[in-house]
Image: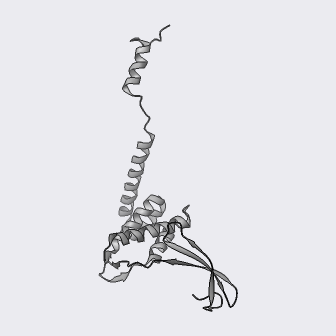
């Protein structure tokens, strides 16, 4: 490993720690030449599928592209960098779990869309506007309307007042009699 300051290859590991999910090892190193300390990350290299683009080209999966897309969509939004990195990890893990040698780029795009939909709706709309390459404002508005309908549906489900059970209503009525007046 080359020192980022002096480019010397002689360094030693000061500290090693396992990452939160256990899939990364963080190593603190010290350059023997200049004394600078730096951090490296070690992860298992797994076979990731090739991504089949719309035009038929194939290229290796690039986690940095996914991370860049998520970061750009979440720019100036209240989404932590760690959450964005974990989302990229989840997308990568999902591709590995598929076990396929080739995956259409649409699978990656839709995974990013789903991740952003759950993280931040503004970031989702930003990414969707580029990813879906809307031809006009009507297509864009349809996407927004679908998002609003979905959001309103979930808000209605959360805000419905709870009704007392039938037995509880009958007990109340029984205590008051038919006229509704309370017994003295």
Q: Position of residue 11 (x, y in %)?
A: 63, 87
Image height check: is 144 above or below 6? above
Q: Residue furthest right?
A: 35
Query: Residue 98 occupies which quadrant of the picture?
Result: bottom left
Q: Position of residue 115 (x, y in %)?
A: 43, 63
**Residue at the (44%, 73%) spot, across then down:** 66
Image quadrant containing the N terminus: bottom right
**Residue at the (37%, 55%) spot, across then down:** 146
Residue nearest the observer in this picture, 50 or 128:
50
Q: Is residue 79 left or right of residue 146?
A: right
**Residue at the (36%, 67%) spot, across then down:** 110
Q: Is residue 127 left or right of residue 76?
A: left
**Residue at the (36%, 83%) spot, across then down:** 59
Q: Position of residue 39 (x, y in %)?
A: 60, 78
Image height check: is 7 above or below 55? below
Residue nearest the observer in this picture, 121 or 3:
3
């Amino acid at each position: 490993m080359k020192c980022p300051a002096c480019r010397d290859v002689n360094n030693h590991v000061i500290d090693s720690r396992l990452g939160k999910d256990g899939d990364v090892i963080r190593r603190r190193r010290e350059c023997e030449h200049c004394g600078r300390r730096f951090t490296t990350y070690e992860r298992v290299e797994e076979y990731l599928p090739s991504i089949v683009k719309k035009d038929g080209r194939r290229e290796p999966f690039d986690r940095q592209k996914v991370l860049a897309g998520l970061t750009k969509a979440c720019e100036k939004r209240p989404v932590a960098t760690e959450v964005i990195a974990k989302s990229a990890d989840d997308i990568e893990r999902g591709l590995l779990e598929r076990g396929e040698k080739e995956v259409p780029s649409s699978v990656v795009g839709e995974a990013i869309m789903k991740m952003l939909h759950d993280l931040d709706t503004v970031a989702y709309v930003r990414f969707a506007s580029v990813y879906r390459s809307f031809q006009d404002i009507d297509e864009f508005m349809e996407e927004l309307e679908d998002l609003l309908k979905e959001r309103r549906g979930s808000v209605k489900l959360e805000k419905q007042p709870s009704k007392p059970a039938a037995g509880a209503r009958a007990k109340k009525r029984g205590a008051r009699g038919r006229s509704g007046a309370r017994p003295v």
